[in-house]
Amino acid sequence: MDKDAYIKQLEAENAALKQRIKTLEKRLEEFERRLGMNSKNSSKPPSSDPPGTQGSSPKQRRKKRGGQKGHQAHLKSLLPKSKVDRFIPLKPDVCSCGSTNLEDTTEPPLRHQYVDLPPIEPIVWEYLQHVCRCKDCGALIYARLPDAIKRRHFGPGVLAIVGILTGVLNTSKRKAAAMLNEVFGVPISLGGLSNCESQLAETLERPHQEVADFVRRQDVAHADETGWPRGNSQKGWLWMCCCTVAAFFVVQTHRSQQAARAVLGAFAGTLVTDRYNAYKFYAGLRQICWAHLKRDFKAISEASGKLGKIGDQLHTLTKEILKLRRRVRDGTLQWQTFQCRMPALQQRIETLLEQGARFDGALGGKCRDILDHRDGLWTFVQDATVEPTNNRAEQQVRQAVLWRKGSFGTQSERGARYVERMLTVCATCRLQERSVIDYLRCACHHYHKGIAIPSLLPETIKCQKIA
């Protein structure tokens, strides 16, 4: 081989090695990006963060445990006098100086309450179905049970406690059965507990549908979804949609556009979601969650070179926008002033996104995807009733996530119906500051009596406690 041919061969090998190094550097950068993903720069939950993950700011890292300086005190509140069973007057006998010459004053007495629970004894009703013989045909007959009792072994109170234990406190079925046996004195098996859940699901069918129809009629709604395993290792999804005073949940087999259509139904208002493509079919107004965008921009800011600088600017501008909107919410910034400040920030955000979209790789793809949702970025600037984040939905989903982690999903369709209806009741009562156990007791009492079940809708009269 002559000299020139050898040089050309070396140049070709060198070019190939440089290209391979460039490819490997990109792969390494992508692996490092994935390795560094946490709840601050991605959609991963905080519970998945490895030990030692720092907060998003030095100020957060310096916080000590316990109540922070200047926080609102949460003091023990006294029960009203109507709830006190016994008053025990205490009068001083001697002064701290040693004198016993004391007189009464008009000062109100200091109050200290001591609360205890008596042993809980369940109320047991036993129906004696007397057997008689017919004198004409000789057949043995007995009186029938009332329709409200037939095929039922537990009353509204027990059903409400089961709902609280398994549907609100996320207690396992074994522990819930043990609690009912040991604390409440109610003999119940795992099968009996499951039957109670089935009765609750049947009772709450109509209230669940009413809440779903109510949310779909609102001007603004928030939607989100999370994984929900089903029996035999099948993957399912729990979808939810909420407004300011109500929320409903639906267990679906897929995380798809078809599932999203089924959840939203005839909703025609402003929809607040993340950028998941299943919602792209929606033709109405949308608002993309800026909390998700903030995490995306944080991830972009961790890239090297010019793209990292673009991400850093996007992250800084996002924090400024959210701070301005919080000031509007707190009443320290007028809505008109907010709208006047936003156009310049909007233009700067979109310009930076267009610059970031020119880069290859996953982070450049994030910029391009965000620009594809351009129409849903700024709805909160035009409408004061629309929030810039989807935190309202994520707060409601959190209870479901805790339930899923403790139960590993559901094994049957009956279980799925119980989950979605109990979550609907819990979230809606919490949003309206209503008692979940009072509502469950009232609903089960009405269902057993065959009368209309009280509604969960906010404009209806709240149900009264059932003794």
Image: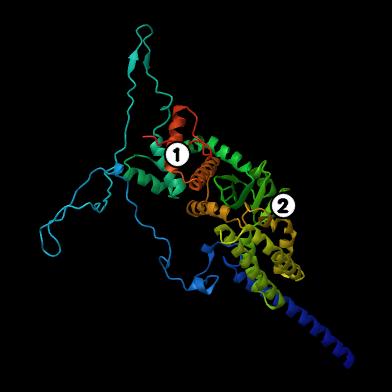
Crowd class of label 1 (few under 14; some 14 to 19; many from 20; radius 10 Å): many
Crowd class of label 2 (few under 14; some 14 to 19; many from 20; radius 10 Å): few
- The image shows residue 63 at horizontal and vertical percentages of 46, 71
Q: Between residue 459 and residue 54, name the one nearer to us.
A: 459
Q: Which residue is drawn at 85% across and 90% down?
A: 7
Q: Which residue is drawn at 51% across and 73% down?
A: 59
Quarter occupied by the N terminus: bottom right
Which corner quadrant of the image does residue 96 belong to? bottom left
Q: How far apart are marks 1 and 2 (CA)?
A: 37 Å
Q: Residue furthest top?
A: 136
Residue placed under numbered mark 1 in the picture:
440
Q: In this view, does 41 lie to the left or right of 466?
A: right
Q: Which residue is drawn at 62% across and 67% down?
A: 320
Which mark is drawn over residue 280? Answer: 2
Q: In this view, does 126 lie to the left or right of 361?
A: left
- The image shows residue 117 at horizontal and vertical percentages of 28, 46
Q: Is mark 1 on a helix, strand or loop?
A: helix
Q: Which residue lies furthest to the bottom in this view?
A: 3
Amino acid type at mark 1:
Leu
Which mark is drawn over residue 327? Answer: none
Q: Residue at x 38, y 8 (%)?
A: 137
The reply to whether discs 1 and 2 touch (Cβ–Cβ < 8 Å) is no
Does residue 20 lie above or below 163 as drawn? below
Q: Between residue 140 and residue 392, name the one nearer to us.
A: 392
Amino acid type at mark 2:
Lys
- The image shows residue 285 at horizontal and vertical percentages of 70, 50
Which corner quadrant of the image does residue 17 belong to? bottom right
- The image shows residue 173 at horizontal and vertical percentages of 43, 46
Q: Is mark 2 on a helix, strand or loop?
A: loop
Q: Earlier in the sequence, mark 1 or mark 2?
A: 2
